Every structure is written in C-alpha cells, then in structure tokens.
Image: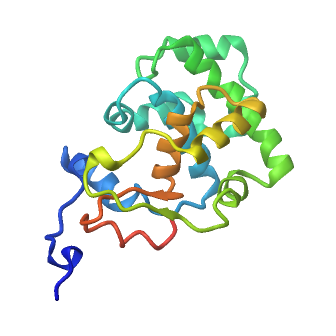
Amino acid sequence: MVSAKDAAQPTPCQWGVMDELYQRYHDECWGKPLHDERRLFELLCLECQQAGLSWSLILHRADGLRRVYDGFDPEKLAAWTDERLEAARQDPAAIRNRLKIKAMRTNARAYAELAHECGGLDAYLWGWVDGQPIVNHPLTMADIPAQSELSRAMSRDLRKRGFTFIGPVVVYSYLQAAGLINDHLEHCPAKYATAGSR
C-alpha cells in the first residue's frame, strides 16, 4: 500500500518561489544546519533588522546592510561610537530605525560576552537542541508556528544576556534560517536535502 507521503508530489514551500533570489535562499540556505560562527552572527543581525518587516526586504538589501555594518564584524560593531551609529542611520542602504541601528552595537557587545562564556553562537545555539535539528512535519504554511517554547525560552535567555530585538518570533525565524528547526513543508524537495552543514 502506498503511503500518503510516497504518493504526494514534491511541492516546494510556497514562499520559496517568489523570485530567483528567494528560491536560491530557500533551496540552499533556509533550514540547512549552519555552524559557521561569523555567518551565525550575521544571520542574527539580519533577523534583528527584519523585526516587523518582511524577510524579502532584508534578503534583497543584505549586501547593502553588510556594507553599512562593516561586514557584520562583531568586534568592529562593538567598538562603534554614537557618531558612527548616526552615520549609519543616514546611509540609504540602512533600515533607518534608530533603535535597530543601536541594536547592532548592543548585540555585538552581548555577543562578545556570550562567546567568552559559551564559546560562541554555534556552541550556544546547538546546545539547546543537543546538536541535532528539530524536524517538524508541516503540510501547509498554516501548520508552521510563529514561535515555540524553545524560541520563548531562548529569547528570555538572550535578553538576559543583553541582546535586543530578539523576541520569540525573531528567535524562531532565526532558528529556522540557521537550520536548528527544519520547517520545510513535508513534500518540499528541500525537506530532506538539508542534512549537510553550511
């Protein structure tokens, strides 16, 4: 007897076919385990910039944001002066929310403390899931939550550590993007093509 899973035709996640850039991000990055420390920090920065906005906007402006924020180098960002923050706000490539811009420096400084205490984002994040991605089995986009017990607990912990713009919805999105949570739809071709790390 053929199971419903075997009988189903491969269907990409609906959001992953919006345009070529989005499709490449969906196919090659989203949900694939990420362990590179610098890229984890960059992704955290981008997710914080996204808060209240669409990921499409952030994805299409990522190159400009990398330029504005010194390549998301945490040491450089941690050393930014108030004048440097204001200069960033005047850059047309930036998301010109003053609090989000300040959060880049705040989070870089919080990251330095986390790296000292925990060894970095890679060790910190993957320690929450015992080193293994959580694989969910959504059939439709409506089955995918905006947050979870894990993202709420991690958000509380990160805020205690001094991070800002890091609520449970942002954290859940971050965990999906970094591959700690695999929320590809069950019949998406990328669902079980995410085992390798990046």
Give the percent coordinates (x, y) of residue 183. 39, 56
Give the percent coordinates (x, y) of residue 112. 79, 40
Give the percent coordinates (x, y) of residue 55. 37, 36
Q: Residue lying furthest right in this view?
A: 117
The quadrant holding residue 155 is top right
Colour logic: rainbow
Report the residue at 51% width, 35% height from top: 170
Give the percent coordinates (x, y) of residue 182. 43, 59
Q: Residue lying furthest bottom in this view?
A: 1
Q: Is residue 103 left or right of residue 34?
A: right
Which image quadrant: the N terminus?
bottom left
Q: Nearer the viewer, residue 68 or 108?
A: 108
Report the residue at 67% width, 11% height from top: 83
Report the residue at 40% width, 55% height from top: 30
Q: Nearer the viewer, residue 168 or 161?
A: 168
When the figure is inspected, residue 143 is found, relative to residue 68, above or below; the finding is: below
Q: Nearer the viewer, residue 1 or 135?
A: 1
Report the residue at 54% width, 58% height from top: 180
Q: Residue lying furthest front in this view?
A: 1
Q: Is residue 48 left or right of residue 126?
A: left
Q: Is residue 75 left or right of residue 141?
A: right
- All told, the count of numbered labels is 0
When the figure is inspected, residue 191 is found, relative to residue 184, above or below; the finding is: below
